[in-house]
């Protein structure tokens, strides 16, 4: 455990060298507030993640830090095939910004063996960041040509239409991205998407 603590300390110190004040200020201006934000760029964090490789214990320890870079790095090094759904639920509860939500989906959530289950549950949530993650995961799965079953299709289109008429711009964009990817699964899917959007006077943007 001491070893993990030392690694976390070392990683946090290394962020000083990656510090980018302009990036950090731009995030603050956009309302992205973290207890600590060094403004490290994603390519630099990816290099750091590649150097450490997949490491469950280190990912858990890094996530506990209220530091932007620690959280992003945690999503990059967490092995998707080892992490339990309960742990992912805790992480999801603790996500407070779209940036971390986006990174979690891209680096980790879409690769989980139970990604579809989480996506459908979160998409139907009444919390914006949960919906945001749910639709983004589905967009990624559709990109990989993973087709939903009939129940999944109906559920997805119902939730997407509700989201597209909702107040949150972020969720609306995520839902539309997922609908676009859904329609790219093939002609039948494209027709289903167009027909659903027509019912609510929406169209592909």
Image (cartoon, rainbow, N blue to C red):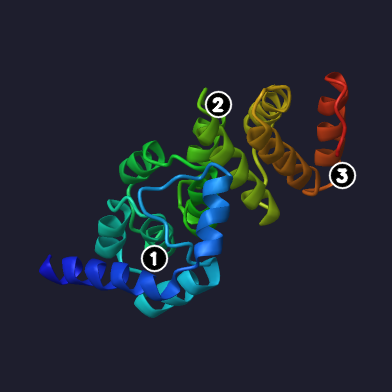
Label 1 or label 3, whichever comes before in sequence order: 1
Q: Quadrant of the C terminus?
A: top right
Report x, y in % for residue 66.
32, 50
Residue under the point 47% across and 77% down: 47
Rendered position, 179 above or below 158: below
Q: Label 2, on which residue? A: 124
Q: Which mark is residue 187?
A: 3
Residue furthest out toward the left? 2
Q: How far apart are marks 3 and 2 (CA)?
A: 26 Å
Rendered position, 185 above or below 159: below
Q: Distance between the residues labelled 1 and 3?
A: 37 Å
Q: Distance between the residues labelled 2 and 1?
A: 28 Å
Give 108 or 102, whichever is nearer the viewer: 102
At numbered mark 1, what does the secondary structure look like: helix, strand or loop?
helix
Asked whether the beta carbons under mark 1 and mark 3 sit within 8 Å of each other, the answer is no
Describe residue 94's horizontal placement relative to residue 157 as left or right.
left
Asked whether the beta carbons under mark 3 and mark 2 sit within 8 Å of each other, the answer is no
Q: In which quarter of the image is the N terminus?
A: bottom left
Report x, y in % for residue 145.
69, 54
Rendered position, 153 above or below 77: above
**Residue 201 sits in which quadrant?**
top right
Q: Label 1, on which residue? A: 77
Rendered position, 109 above or below 117: below
Describe residue 159's horizontal placement relative to residue 99 as left or right.
right
Label 2 or label 1, whichever comes before in sequence order: 1
At numbered mark 2, what does the secondary structure look like: helix, strand or loop?
loop
């Amino acid at each position: 455990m001491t070893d993990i603590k030392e690694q976390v300390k070392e990683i946090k110190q290394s962020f000083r060298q990656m510090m980018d004040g302009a990036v950090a200020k731009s995030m603050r201006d956009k309302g992205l507030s973290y207890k600590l934000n060094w403004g490290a760029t994603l390519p630099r964090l990816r290099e750091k993640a590649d150097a450490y490789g997949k490491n469950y214990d280190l990912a858990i320890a890094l996530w506990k830090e209220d530091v932007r870079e620690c959280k992003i790095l945690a999503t990059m090094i967490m092995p998707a095939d080892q992490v339990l759904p309960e742990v992912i639920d805790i992480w999801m509860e603790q996500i407070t910004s779209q940036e971390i939500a986006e990174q979690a989906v891209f680096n980790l959530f879409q690769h989980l063996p139970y990604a579809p289950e989480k996506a459908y549950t979160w998409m139907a949530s009444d919390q914006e960041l949960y919906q945001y993650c749910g639709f983004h995961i589905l967009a990624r799965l559709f990109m990989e040509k993973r087709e939903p079953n009939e129940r999944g299709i109906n559920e997805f289109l119902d939730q997407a239409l509700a989201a597209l008429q909702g107040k949150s711009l972020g969720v609306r964009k995520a839902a539309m991205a997922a609908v676009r990817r859904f329609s790219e699964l093939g002609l039948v899917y494209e027709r289903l998407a167009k027909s659903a959007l027509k019912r609510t006077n929406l169209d592909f943007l």
